[in-house]
Image: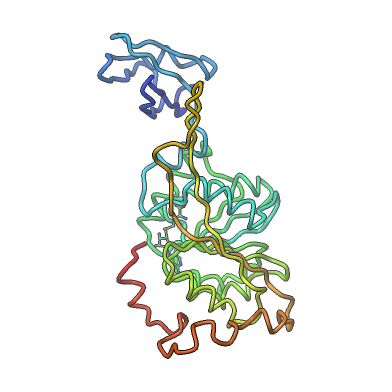
């Protein structure tokens, strides 16, 4: 490990500290201090003892560790969901991926890793202060600029058509992904995948109905992932007491070729899908403020 690199210290109670190694500096905790110089030049994966007897494991942070501890502008996509997005939206080496909004840049790091140096991740963010946070985080994680990354400031629905970009995959993590469906459909290559990450059921409903109504996507698939750790010690083998429960719902659909439509029966809700006596608004008709009152970016 060299000066300027980030390392993670974990004490024997599982408490974690991230630090950037600097010659001559000290790390302080309630267990005294450690000299950075003791860590610089060593290979990761060892334990050190501080001046007051605290023991720490020393490793470089994994991506999944980095994104949950890095500075945040907006809420981040958690590693459990980033893994689902990479797998189920089929992000492959060399792919052209468009992403919005970039938020804190957590998902961006996973996308860049998956496309590699010969792919492209084109990220859009409409708030400059979040774009700045993301730029710092992504640059820190990759220890410099990633050759496949391009970050643009602006609203995806307006900027993507202007850019003329074509994409194999488009990932939307934003309040109102339905506003971007036209732009996404125009940018996606036939067979390409749109993947939405939405926090609430009202957003989910509106996004899925908008994709269906657009007519150029296959029937959306919808799921969520719940991760539960297990405690395994002797005969005490049981689920952990805490878990990461709901974060967001995931939606994917594939772009049909130009002029092609998915089979009709998969495009519309079955008659009576809202119940025979239902006369209220359909999800796609809900006014935007109903959603904006309950959800922030
Ligand atoms: C929840 S955050 C994204 C977090 C990000 N995926 C991550 O893992 O760090 C949502 C972001 O989308 C941005 N946003 C919302 N609508 C947008 C749009 N139409 N175009 C571009 N950015 C948008 C917001 O400003 C916000 O920063």
Q: Quadrant of ligand 1?
A: bottom left
* Residue located 58% across and 61% down the image: 98
Q: Is residue 217 visible?
A: yes
* Residue located 57% across and 58% down the image: 122
Instruction: Residue lying at the far left in this picture: please name it.
Output: 30
Up-down: is 5 above or below 210? above
Residue 77 coordinates in the image, percent (x, y): 47, 51
Residue 80 coordinates in the image, percent (x, y): 52, 46
Residue 212 coordinates in the image, percent (x, y): 59, 79
Residue 54 coordinates in the image, percent (x, y): 33, 13
Up-down: is 17 above or below 212? above
- Which of the 4 quarters of the picture holds residue 6? top left
**Is 148 situated left or right of 172 in this image?**
right
Quadrant the C terminus occupies: bottom left
**Is 44 situated left or right of 126 in this image?**
right
**Is 10 situated left or right of 41 in this image?**
left
Q: Nearer the viewer, residue 7 or 146?
A: 7
């Amino acid at each position: 490990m060299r000066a300027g690199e980030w390392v993670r210290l974990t004490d024997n109670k599982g408490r974690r500290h991230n630090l950037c190694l600097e010659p001559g500096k000290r790390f302080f905790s309630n267990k005294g201090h450690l000299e950075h110089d003791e860590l610089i030049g060593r290979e990761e994966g060892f334990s050190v003892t501080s001046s007051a007897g605290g023991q720490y494991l020393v490793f470089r942070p994994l991506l999944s560790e980095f994104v949950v501890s890095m500075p945040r502008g907006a809420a981040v996509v958690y590693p459990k969901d980033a893994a689902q997005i990479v797998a189920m939206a089929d992000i492959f080496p060399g792919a052209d991926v468009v992403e919005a909004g970039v938020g804190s840049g957590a998902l961006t790091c996973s996308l860049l890793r998956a496309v590699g140096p010969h792919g492209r991740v084109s990220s859009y963010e409409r708030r400059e202060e979040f774009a700045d946070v993301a730029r710092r985080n992504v640059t820190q994680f990759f220890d410099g600029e990633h050759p496949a990354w391009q970050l643009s400031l602006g609203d995806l629905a307006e900027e993507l058509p202007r850019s003329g970009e074509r994409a194999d995959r488009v990932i939307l993590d934003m309040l109102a992904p339905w506003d971007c469906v036209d732009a996404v459909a125009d940018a996606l290559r036939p067979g390409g995948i749109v993947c939405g990450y939405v926090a609430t059921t009202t957003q989910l409903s509106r996004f899925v109905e908008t994709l269906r109504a657009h007519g150029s996507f296959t029937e959306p698939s919808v799921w969520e992932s719940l991760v539960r750790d297990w405690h395994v010690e002797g005969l005490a083998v049981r689920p952990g007491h805490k878990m990461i429960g709901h974060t967001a719902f995931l939606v994917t659909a594939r772009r049909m070729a130009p002029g092609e439509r998915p089979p009709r029966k998969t495009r519309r809700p079955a008659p009576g899908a809202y119940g025979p006596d239902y006369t209220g608004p359909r999800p796609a008709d809900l006014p935007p403020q109903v959603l904006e009152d309950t959800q922030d970016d």
